[in-house]
Amino acid sequence: MTYTPHTPKQVSEMLATIGVDSTASLFDTIPKEHRFPEVDLPPALSEPELVSVFRKLSERNDDLEHATSFLGAGAYNHYIPSIVDHIISRSELYTAYTPYQPEVSQGTLQAIFEYQSMLCALTGMDASNASHYDGATALAEAIITAIAAGRGRRRRVVMASSVHPQYRQVCDTYTSGMDVDIVTSDDTLVTTDALLSLVDDQTACLIVQSPDFFGRIHDLSAIADALHTQNALLVVVANPISLGLLRPPGEQGADIVVGDGQPLGNSLAFGGPHLGYFACTKALVRRMSGRLVGETVDHAENRGYVLTLSTREQHIRRGKASSNICTNQGLNALAAAVYLSVMGKQGLAHVARLCYHKAHHAAALIDGLAGFCVDSTHSFFHEFVVECPCDADRIRDRVYAQSGIVVGYPLGSDYVDMAKRLLVCVTEMNSAEQIADLARALEEATA
Amino acid sequence: MTEPIIYELGQPGRTGIDLPPCDVPESPLPTALVRDDLDLPEVSQLDVVRHFVRLSQLNYGVDIGMYPLGSCTMKYNPKINEDIARLSGFASTHPLQPEEAVQGNLQLLFEMQQALAALSGFDAVSLQPAAGAHGELAGVLMIRAYHLSRGDTQRRVMLIPDSAHGTNPASTTMAGFRAIELASDARGNVDLAELGKHLNDDLAGMMLTNPNTLGLFDEQITQITEMVHSAGGLMYGDGANFNAMMGIAKPADLGFDVMHFNLHKTFATPHGGGGPGSGPVGANTTLAPFLPGPVVQRIDPPDTGDTVQPSFRLQMPEQSIGRLKAFHGNFGVIVRAYAYIRSLGAAGLRQASEMAVLNANYVQTKLRDVLPLPYDRMCAHECVLQGIVDGAEDIRALDISKRLIDYGFHPPTNYFPLIVPEALMIEPTETESKETLDRFCEAIRCIAQEAIGSPELLHDAPSSAPIGRLDEVRAARQLKLRWLPPDESDADAH
């Protein structure tokens, strides 16, 4: 299939206008020996052939629409209301680009402004940007913001080891060329004293995830107070669905809140595109990276929206910009805005409570199985750690083979001493019956 | 024509969705950790639908008309690729499922790595980066890791032409390098004499967009890459303009060591109002071990005579700079881009690049007697003119851009590249017809006449858009970044 419309006659006319005799001669500046190389690609496919090839590929996967899944660990299976895909499929929205021309981009701009407003409400923060690539890159950008806030004099970052392992890896990569020292607490329990003992007068920020990678909820107020007496910032990673139930980090003294917005109406899509959200206090607005939409008026005092504070950004500040980010995850942020609008105050609170209650019900059932143990000394949201009688990846594989249930995420590959531990996630997508099936399947797998 | 903010619609107690009741016994909530209030909209489903549909009507997209935004490659986004990305096998797979359960996804990623390698001539490709700037960061970090692996710790200088995108120097700074700007010569090429001054042991490499942001293919490309290599530096290719290059030349053949692709530009995935994009990086054998990961590897079964299919697995490259993103890149975007590649095949992709370059040269030729053309030679996939009209001294590029909206077109990129005063950077793309290009050129011709005869039409433009020119200074000074109820608004002034 080609999407080029010219007839051969038109091509000839256009070449004549330009004053050359062939399309090949448009490329005379390219060194002759490298011009028009062989490119080894499979032959072109017509539309029906294309559908058939890709359908076959897609069917080599076991998708979660046809399975019972308790897999979370950073990407979550939630119900996406039908209208979300209908709205983001409006081609006025999805075939536009970054709203550089506000007069013909008010749809995109106002939707981002509304996204920013809803993210502020959810996190309890003063300002939100228009999105980052994902939760992990939003966290890396938070480190850069925190270092800038300390005017570059504080180069130490304290990270709880209960932050998502892949987020920590991304932060390491992002900062590898910067003079930044990331110190990771080896205390997976996130005891306030253990974390604060790593904070010194060179520390720019402390990073805590709540609910953390293991699902546990932390009270952040004491940490925030102690950090602020040392002029260091508190960066919190939070699952946005949990904020339908839990006290927002902003109320507990967080300076920056980031996370992955995928649970807000975005498909799993094998890990992307998702979106990273980034929200902060007023004090940090001019240090934050990424696009920002602000309200203003036109000459007739009509309310309208524009990209603003662009003097922070790479296209103006070049090498001195707060970040290199340009394209972000606009359509995913739109999906999040539509999701939050249609769920609304009651819907999001209901989803969060369903997750909470179902997860606790599942944890109680599993804890009652011979050989399995769930540590429930700590409050958790919709994920919890199960201590299994044998290696968790063996249990996962066995249950999957026997019953097709995806039981969760074995923690051994990320934490060496956790080979027998399984991270289980329960959302509103899991019925009481599925939870009972999970308990039964775990029992049978160890019988 | 303004639309209320979603919060201004609806009534307390209203909701847009019905969810099942709780079917398990409820557990006690951790009361001290539970929030008191949640300030989200309370609207019906129809309120939400109408609100966002009305917002969509305030937007301009490729599906409405020509969107010649230079350097952004706003080509047609085939609908079939949207359908394919939504197949449940792609859209509903979890990134942490066991590899055996997602062999289709891994095969697709592997084949995409191969396809990008075939088009670019590179040895290996990583699909991790989520956008072009993210790919740039990957590439410069790879260059850094390479020099460090050889003990070359003093190589901290990255050369960047003055025509480059702002992301290049910003990525360079993030990677801990120092950016030095290189002047362009009178023909829009890298100035070789300037380049010669920086060929020393501090040189880490050079970032070059080719064709560059003037829309020009550098006439001395092989000399440039040889000079940089001779000083021990490496060549980074910014692939933002790869839409001029498919099947035309391979960056690896021209001497680039690493390059990012913008799948949302070259490979027709929708721009989404500002993303998602995807910015894979390709590298030659020198830099391939440093690619971000994981990447996908094919495992061929032992040759037993049986027809066993190969399998695919994720692997970290040997000396990888590490992860740049959680999971496996912007997979959904990669699916669409790979579908595009398979639709066109090698010949179709070459034809796309040829027609993109034909269209840009056609527009350049038709407009060269209307607006000044700062670099008068054959262009690549875009042309850069100046928004200056003789006899209309108070007219600027921005005025011409805004007036184009009244003629039904999206404006080109204005004021970039920075080295061209009053720049209008026009990228028609290959999917626009000759008739559309003729209408576009005619519109510019009319606007240039209006500039002299009735300049107020330009100053007051756009007159047909949903809203007039907006006060950007006020937006930055009286910062309002979120909606608040009227009684709280004043207290929140930043």
Image (cartoon, rainbow, N blue to C red):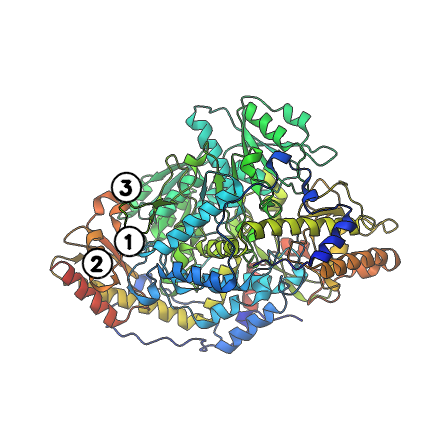
- Based on the displayed image, in which of its 4 quarters is residue A95 positioned? bottom right
Q: Chain of mark 2?
A: A
Q: Position of residue A402 (x, y in %)?
A: 20, 62
Which of the 4 quarters of the picture holds residue A370?
bottom left
- Looking at the image, is mark 3 or mark 1 earlier in the sequence? 3
**Against A395, is B203 above or below?**
above
**Percent from the top left, x then y, of residue B106?**
38, 51
Q: Are marks 3 and 2 on the same chain?
A: yes
Q: Chain of mark 3?
A: A
Frontmost residue, B4 versus B133: B133
Helix, strand or loop for disc 2? loop
Residue type (three-letter) at the residue carrying disc 3: Asp
Alpha-carbon span between mark 3 and mark 2: 21 Å
Circle 1: is it few (<14), some (14-19), or many (20+) Cα within 10 Å? many
Looking at the image, which is closer to me, B207 or A215? B207
Report the front residue among A125 and A139.
Answer: A139
Q: Amino acid at mark 2?
A: Ser
Q: How dense is the environment of label 3, judged by Cα within 10 Å: few (below 14), some, or many (20 and up)? A: few
The span from disc 3 to disc 1 (Cα, nearest Å) is 15 Å
Which residue is drawn at the image coordinates 41% and 73% (left, top)? A346
Image mark 1: chain: A
SS at badge 3: loop
Res. A186 mark: 3
Quarter holding the C terminus of chain B is: bottom right
- How crowded is the residue under tag 2: few (<14 C-alpha within 10 Å), some, or many (20+)? some
Query: Residue most toward the top?
Result: B201
Residue ID for mark 1: A214
State yes or no: discs 2 and 1 in contact (Cβ < 8 Å).
no
Residue drawn at the location 65% of the way across and 51% of the way down:
B356
- Residue A248 visible in rendering: no
> Left or right: B26 with respect to B491?
left
